[in-house]
Image (cartoon, rainbow, N blue to C red):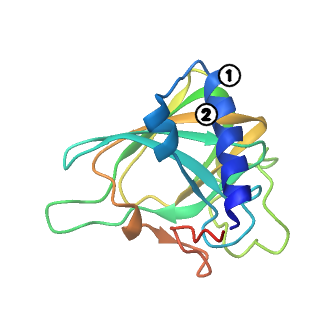
Amino acid sequence: MKRSEYDQIKREGLELMKKAGIYLTPEEEERMEVTDFGLNDPYHEGLMLHVYVNTKRCCAKELPMLPGQICAEHRHPPLGPDNPGKEETFRCRYGEVYVHVPGEPTLNPKAKIPAGKEDVYTVWHEIVLKQGEQYTLAPNTKHWFQAGPSGAVVSEFSSYSEDGTDVYTDPEISRFTTIED
């Protein structure tokens, strides 16, 4: 991703945070990450995230999402015999977000995936979270989520997070973004 696009998306994410009434310090704004999952299509499949804390016991993040932006399908696998993987709760702070998990497929889902991606989005039970609503995922649960038409800000509360261990359905995905100047 080009540095100029990275910076523009980051600005848009910070504006969404302000609409949600969430303000970061200048240092926190600087640390906010933008990922395109290595797909170079961040307005469709991408995510911004600010990590408040990530210890061996807990993690808290803000995930501002642009309108229609998708966090690609993935799961958080076990990290060892005493760690079943990340358990996480998503709380919608602004807009709405469509969370997809295993279960009975939703007949008319609000979420829309990019054309040609039908084989990498496999769970279609949709949970619509509006501002103030939340949903908790068990460890190792396949899931993906998409922001509604106004974008969304999602607070994530979880056990320890090790993003590099996430398992994505799409083999083309790389969790960490390469930035070109």
Q: Which quarter of the rendering shows the C terminus?
A: bottom right
Q: Nearer the viewer, residue 109 or 65?
A: 65
SS type, badge 1: helix
Give x and y (percent) for residue 39: 68, 72
Q: Quadrant of residue 169?
A: bottom right
Q: Is residue 31 left or right of residue 158?
A: right
Can you say whether 154 is above or below 21 in the image? below
Q: How many marks?
A: 2
Whichever of callouts 2 and 1 sits on the residue coming sooner in the sequence is 1
Q: Is residue 93 left or right of residue 163?
A: right
Q: Quadrant of residue 18?
A: top right
Residue 19 got which mark? 1
Q: Residue at x 46, y 46 (%)?
A: 31
Give x and y (percent) for residue 28: 45, 37
Q: Of the residues tagged 2 and 1, which is closer to the observer? A: 1
Q: Residue at x 76, y 55 (%)?
A: 43
Q: Amino acid at mark 2?
A: Val
Residue 2 got which mark? none
Can you say whether 77 is above or below 27 in the image? below
Q: Which quarter of the rendering shows the N terminus?
A: bottom right
Q: Nearer the viewer, residue 41 or 159?
A: 41
Q: Is residue 163 left or right of residue 69?
A: left
Can you say whether 109 is above or below 89 in the image? below
Q: Give the class, few, some or many, for how many residues have Cα within 10 Å of label 1's Cα (few <14, many ≥20).
A: some
Discs 2, 1 touching: Cβ within 8 Å: yes
Give x and y (percent) for residue 157: 38, 37
Residue 153 got which mark? 2
